[in-house]
Every structure is written in C-alpha cells, then in structure tokens.
Image (cartoon, grey):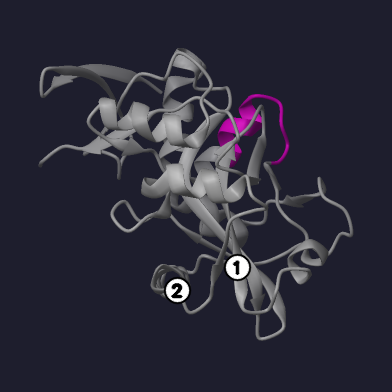
C-alpha cells in the first residue's frame, strides 16, 4: 500500500499503486468538513470532481490513515430510493458526467424544504435506472422496521457498491480488526412511504471505521477529495 505524489497541470496530486486506477489522480483532502455544495466547489478548485465510493475506498486502502483518509469522506455516488414493480429498491450511480451532484446547490436548497424527490419520468432518473440495471447496481432493501440497522455486506451487494474494491476493502477492514463492512441504508418500510411516482435522492459517504452510509444528504458534512483522470 502506498501513495505517490505527482505534479499535474502545476498541481500536486496523489497516485495510488492499484490496478484499474492508473489514470486516477487524487487531490489532498479538504482541510475541513463540508456540506456537499461546498465539497463540489472544493473539488472544482482542484480541477476535478468528487471521488466515487469505489475510488474513495481504493484511496483509503492505499493511504492507510494518511491525509484524513480514514474519516468521513463525501462521494459523488448517488442512491435513488423508490418502489419498482412493488419492490423497494436502491439504484446506484456515479457517472462522472451526468451526475446530479454537479447541481449540488439546487439539490441542497430543495432538500432543506422537505427532501430531494424526483419523478420517475425525469430524464436523469431514466438514465440512472438504465445505468444501474446495465451495471448490476440495483439492490433490494433490508426489511427492518427502523433505521440504523445494516446490511451485513454480502459479495453481490458489495460489488454493486464497491465494484472491484469489494474483496480488497473487506480484507483491509479485517486487517483493522473488523470482521465485516456495514452499510447503513434506508429500510424497506421507509422507502415504502415514498410516493409511487417518485424516487428520493441520497448519497453514499464513507463514515467511520467499517461503516458506510447509503443515506447521506446534501447537507451532510464530510471531507472532500477531488479525483481527475490523467491522459494515458
């Protein structure tokens, strides 16, 4: 596990020694915890975008505690909660181009007025559904009646969230004394209260130790880290 400092476009970034992330350049962490609109502004000031949850996990493993990597981390990975064909589901997406996180100011403002809900016939929602289905990132929700109970991460669910980093992340957490990765999500009962024609927009964030939050809001405060993709 290692970080390497490099200069790109007259800025200093980190590279990580991990297959599949050769083009990724990671900025230093934001010095403070930020709400998502400010996290987006911070990453733009670094010339990049918010890291995805898969990228955040890859960096966390390689950094192994350096540069605030083991604290709360914001990501651009979006979760759409809603009922589809009578099933309460979570659909995941972190497309670097078509991503609602780029409109974080608007999202935050709407969220403060009662939550961020979109109609299922919205073009962005259609695109997320298509990508989530294509990339096997559709998850059935836990049936507990109250929030705070976790998915104990099964491999299939893990790959939908962490992609190629599922097994390395589990191994990394075991090396830190945690037998499992816990993902806190909205429950089936909560999603069942969302109107049939709507989805609710939430975000993934790395929380603490072996906990990942799948219901962060645009007002959640976390540290931000930019990622950009160098030309081969």
Task: Work out which quarter of the rendered image holds the N terminus and state it.
Answer: top left
Residue 39 vs residue 72: left or right?
left
Q: Which residues are magenta?
A: 170-180
- According to the picture, the residue beneath numbered tag 1 turns out to be 199
Q: Are marks 1 and 2 in contact (CB under 8 Å)?
A: no
- Residue plotted at (55% across, 57% down): 79
- According to the picture, the residue beneath numbered tag 2 turns out to be 122
- Residue plotted at (56% across, 45% down): 204
Quarter where residue 76 is shown = top left
Question: Magenta stretch: residue 194 in it?
Answer: no
Label 1 secondary element: strand
Q: Nearer the viewer, residue 199 or 26?
A: 199
Q: Nearer the viewer, residue 43 or 52?
A: 43
Residue 115 vs residue 187: left or right?
left
The number of discs equals: 2
The image position of residue 220, as x and y in percent, is 60, 35
Instruction: Please say if 163 is above or below 17.
Output: below
Residue 43 vs residue 160: left or right?
left
Marks 1 and 2 sit apart, C-alpha to C-alpha, by 10 Å
């Amino acid at each position: 596990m290692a970080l390497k400092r490099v200069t790109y476009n007259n800025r200093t970034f980190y590279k990580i020694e991990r297959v599949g992330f050769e083009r990724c350049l990671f900025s230093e962490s934001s010095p403070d915890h930020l709400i998502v609109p400010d996290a987006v502004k911070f990453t733009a000031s670094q010339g990049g975008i918010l890291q995805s949850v898969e990228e955040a996990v890859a960096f966390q493993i390689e950094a192994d505690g350096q540069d605030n990597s083991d604290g709360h981390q914001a990501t651009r990975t979006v979760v759409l909660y809603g009922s589809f064909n009578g099933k309460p589901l979570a659909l995941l997406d972190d497309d670097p181009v078509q991503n609602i996180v780029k409109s974080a100011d608007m999202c935050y403002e709407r969220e403060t007025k009662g939550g961020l809900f979109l109609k299922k016939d919205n073009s962005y929602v259609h695109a997320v559904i298509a990508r989530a289905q294509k990339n096997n990132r559709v998850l059935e929700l836990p049936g507990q009646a109250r929030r705070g109970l976790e998915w104990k991460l099964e491999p299939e669910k893990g790959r939908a969230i962490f992609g190629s980093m599922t097994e390395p992340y589990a191994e990394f957490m075991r090396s830190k004394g945690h037998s499992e990765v816990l993902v806190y999500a909205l429950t089936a009962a909560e999603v069942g209260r969302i109107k049939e024609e709507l989805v609710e927009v939430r975000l993934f964030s790395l929380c603490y130790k072996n906990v990942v939050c799948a219901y962060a809001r645009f007002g959640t405060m976390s540290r931000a880290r930019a990622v950009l993709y160098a030309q081969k």
